[in-house]
Amino acid sequence: MKGDIGVIGLAVMGQNLILNMNDNGFTVVAHNRTAAKVDEFLQGPAKGTNIIGAYSLEELVEKLEAPRKVMLMVRAGEVVDKFIEALVPLLDKGDIIIDGGNTNYPDTNRRVAALKEKGIHFIGAGVSGGEEGARFGPSIMPGGSAEAWPAVKPIFQAISAKTDAGEPCCDWVGNDGAGHFVKMVHNGIEYGDMQLITEAYQFMKDG
């Protein structure tokens, strides 16, 4: 049995997204740079599931159905570029890399363009909702290579939060870094709201 999607990065967000995908009927291949983390996950939260472990990028890619979909849940910045650099020689034209971190949108613009030259699709997806959202339904803001959306859409819309009307809190945002741009604006509004709440509380408390 091959995986529907691979996820790299087994911190809490990565683990919870994988468990969410598993609950929604998708077979996930899980990888982490530290092999012990893979074992810990498989023998802990993922025990008894269909989640598949991979101990190298080669093994991860080999265990995925084509077109391969590989989602990075790692720290934004240089780490993302290093994983992309390592993955590209292992992938075929038409395969998809997804960055689910809080990446600066110009970096996503650059990666979409660079990978397009190699025939590989790139999606930058903002993921909102924290640890709880990742596990039971985040809001997902994908953007990048539009050609990749049909392959990723069933997974993302299945695992996302739903409105009262049952609509998924996930849809295509636009090309290049649009998804990460929307996540940046979302975070700016959220943190502004938090600041207003704390200041109002301070005024009421301290007079």
Image (cartoon, rainbow, N blue to C red):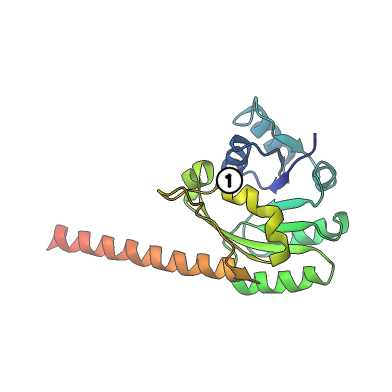
Q: Nearer the viewer, residue 33 or 159?
A: 159
Residue 73 visible in the displayed image: no
Provide residue 151's location: percent of width, then percent of height.
Answer: 71, 54
Q: Could you tell me which residue is drawn at 69 percent across and 31 percent down?
A: 50
Q: Nearer the viewer, residue 164 or 20?
A: 164
Provide residue 153's location: percent of width, then percent of height.
Answer: 64, 54
Position of 205 relative to 7 (above/below) = below
Q: Nearer the viewer, residue 43 or 176?
A: 176
| Amino acid at pointer 1 | Ala
Q: Could you tell me which residue is drawn at 64 percent across and 48 percent down?
A: 155
Q: Nearer the viewer, residue 195 or 4?
A: 4
Q: What residue occupies the far front of the structure in this picture?
A: 165
Quadrant for residue 119, please give it: bottom right
Provide residue 3's location: percent of width, then percent of height.
Answer: 75, 40
Q: Is residue 64 left or right of residue 105?
A: right
Q: Quadrant of the C terminus?
A: bottom left
